[in-house]
Image (spheres, helix red, strand yellow):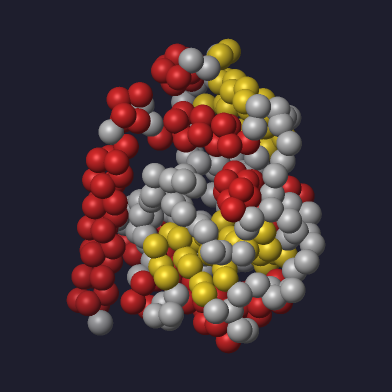
Amino acid sequence: MQFKNILIIADIEGSSGCWSYSDSSFMTRGWRRACIGMTEDVGSLVAGLFDAGVQRVSVHDFHRTGFNILPERIAPRAKVTSGYRLGPVPGIGDPRGAEAVMFLGMHAASGTKGFLAHTFTSRIRRLEVNGKPMPEVEFFAASLAPYGLRPIFFSGCSAACAQARTAIPGIHTFPIDKTAGPDNFDAESWRSDLATAAMKSLGNKSTMPYTPQGPFRAKVIMRDGPKIARKLAQRWGFRHEGDRIYIDTPDIHALYQSSIRLCYLTPRIEKIIPAGLFLYNLLGRLGLAWVRLSLHFSA
């Protein structure tokens, strides 16, 4: 089997341009460099997939505002989507047509030993589901399962790769070593190997759409303590004890929706999500315009 229509979900923490928390933070000098590195990583992967015979590649920028990739630096045959969509898949929109999904630049779950490890937001100190840490790749892969997408490839730090393999047996992984720092990292060589590994995963026959069976009980430990935990739990009607919030759902889709509400929304904002997304995407566009302007003046 060789997949011909690929969806790429791209994040920044596991990219070749991000080496600190500041690099992942919006509108910093480090973030500007990280955007370039993330773009080059995606571009190398996309070019490799087309060389391997893939007919269609869609890229979704999935870090912070969703505006970190410079589309003009990606092969024009690829469709690069910046910003977030309301649905049908949260953030992604409509993935119909894609056969498989690749995850690039990802990070490990909150509360684990990975580079800038977090799940959804760094305000969560640890997120456990049914007694185990849960990384974002599980939520993202499960949200795409109803559309038949198979998770075939994952790249991030070694801890993130190990978590992906545990959660989704058979998924191909390719790590990035962040331990030696950027000065000792050969980005071009790593990108070449990344593209080669991704091309090999096109023949991955091991994975199926990711459909973990419920019920699910999530324990969310908030970094800022009991007061914040109580406020967030009461906002959405979740049970809480000290700095811990408990969420019980019958399936992973309901858990994903509850997690989005907990981390990003208020009841008032939820009622005006279309307008809120427009403004948030506008903020992202302005940030990426700043990156382009900075590149222009530094050229």
Location of residue 165 (image quadrant): bottom right
Nearest the eye: 122 or 88: 88
Residue 88 image offset from top left, x and y in percent: 46, 46
Q: Please give left or right for residue 22 compared with residue 253 in the image.
A: left
- As rendered, which of 145 and 270 lies closer to the eye? 145
Which residue is located at x 52 percent, y 17 percent? 238
Task: Judge left or right: residue 24 versus residue 127.
Answer: left
**Residue 272 at what x, y percent from top left?**
28, 33
Q: Where is residue 74 in the image (x, y as percent from the top left)?
A: 41, 77
Residue 187 at what x, y percent from top left?
54, 77
Q: Which residue lies furthest to the bottom in this view?
A: 51
Q: Is residue 251 above or below residue 117?
A: above
- Residue lying at 74% horizontally and 74% vertically, measured from the top left: 1
Can the viewer see residue 81? Answer: yes
In the image, what residue occupies the spot 69% across and 53% down? 209
- Which quadrant of the figure contains the C terminus? bottom left
